[in-house]
Every structure is written in C-alpha cells, then in structure tokens.
C-alpha cells in the first residue's frame, strides 16, 4: 500500500511539472509517459490536472484548455475534434453522501467526437456527452446529453439541437 501511494505521488509530481511545460508536445509526452493514450495533434493547455492518467484516452485533433481538471479514476474517454474549454471539470469518481463510511463510487465518462464543453462546465460521473454536442459555460451535467444537442444550466437541461453536418478539424496545426 505504501509503495502504491509513493508511485501515485511520483506520477502526480511528474504531471504537475509536465502541465507547466512551455509546449503542447512536452505536456502530451508527459501524460503519455504516465500511461495516458493520446492521439495525434492534441493540444493541451497549461495547468491541466489529471488523476489516474493510465485510465485516460484522448482521440486525435482534440483541444484541452488551460486549468482543466480531468479525473480519470473511473475511466475517461474524450473523442476526436473535441474542445474542452478552460477550467472545465470532468469527474469520474465521487463520494456517496448517504454512506456511513463516505464510500467512493466510480463511473466512466465518455465524451463523443466533435463536442464542445464550454468554460467552467462540470461533468459528473457516469455521463455520456453524445457526438457533436455542446455543454454551455458554467453548466453542471448530471445526465447523458444526446448526440448533436445543446445543453446548459444547473443541472443541465436540453436547450436545442446542433447542426449535424460538422466537418471541422481541431488540434495543433502545423504550418
């Protein structure tokens, strides 16, 4: 148990350093060295925080903004051409407030291709954000968001539909 705790702290320390690296390439490399599966042309903003990177998958051409919190303890998958804006928080683990021992529970979060999780949105454990969907700034998502939908509020509710003919490509562009 002590060895496991030391290993977790070493991973946290290395992630802390890599999150402050001056280039996307160094930040991506740092996460990959800690076990994350990251596709090509992914852009990672400074100051991101990742728990259990070995349970994190980020597909190609995705942009993760500054100071984003990615809790992958329960498993976290982010699709291609997605944008997770600054200061968003994605949780895959939480405490059971009814538990006499304050027990933990985990559930994976899946974020589909071509999604946009706006500034300071929070996604809770067990949620799936469908392909092409948008989560409005400051929203708290407690239930699945269907594909090509727009959701917002606390808790997030469906607001409308999004164009299904999406052809954009995100990520780091090389000139």
Image (cartoon, rainbow, N blue to C red):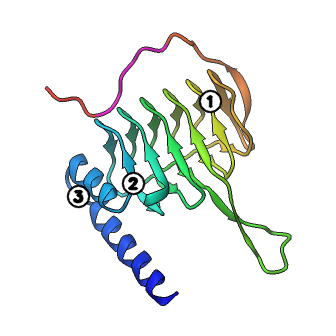
Which element type, helix, strand or loop, lies under badge 3? Answer: loop
Instruction: Give the Cα distance between marks 2 and 3.
Output: 17 Å
Dots 2 and 1: beta carbons under 8 Å? Answer: no
Which element type, helix, strand or loop, lies under badge 2? Answer: loop
Is residue 169 a member of the stretch shown in magenta? yes
Dots 1 and 3: beta carbons under 8 Å? Answer: no
Specify the principal SS of the magenta part.
loop
Which element type, helix, strand or loop, lies under badge 1? Answer: loop
Q: Between label 2 and label 1, give the one nearer the viewer.
A: 2
Residue in the picture at 63% in, 47% down: 123
- Front residue of 3/27: it is 3
Q: Is residue 20 above or below residue 59?
A: below
- Front residue of 48/136: it is 48
Q: Between label 2 and label 3, give the one nearer the viewer.
A: 2
Q: Which mark is residue 130?
A: 1
Point out residue 107 in the picture as x, y percentages from the top left corner.
67, 54
Residue in the picture at 75% in, 43% down: 155
Counting every numbered tag in the picture gives 3
Where is mark 3, residue-wise? 21
């Amino acid at each position: 148990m002590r060895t496991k705790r030391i290993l977790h702290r070493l991973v946290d320390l290395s992630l802390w350093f890599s999150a402050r690296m001056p280039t996307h390439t160094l930040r991506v490399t740092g996460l990959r060295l800690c076990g994350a599966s990251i596709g090509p042309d992914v852009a990672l903003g400074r100051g991101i925080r990742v728990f259990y990177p070995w349970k994190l998958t980020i597909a190609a051409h995705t942009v993760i903004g500054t100071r984003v919190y990615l809790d992958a303890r329960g498993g976290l998958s982010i699709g291609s051409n997605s944008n997770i804006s600054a200061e968003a928080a994605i949780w895959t683990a939480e405490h059971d407030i009814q538990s006499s021992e304050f027990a933990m529970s985990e559930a994976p979060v899946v974020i589909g291709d071509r999604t946009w999780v706006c500034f300071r949105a929070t996604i809770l454990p067990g949620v799936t954000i469908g392909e092409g969907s948008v989560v409005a700034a400051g929203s708290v998502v407690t239930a699945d968001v269907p594909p090509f939908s727009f959701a917002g509020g606390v808790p997030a509710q469906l607001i409308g539909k999004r164009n299904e003919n999406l052809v954009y490509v995100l990520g780091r562009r090389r000139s």
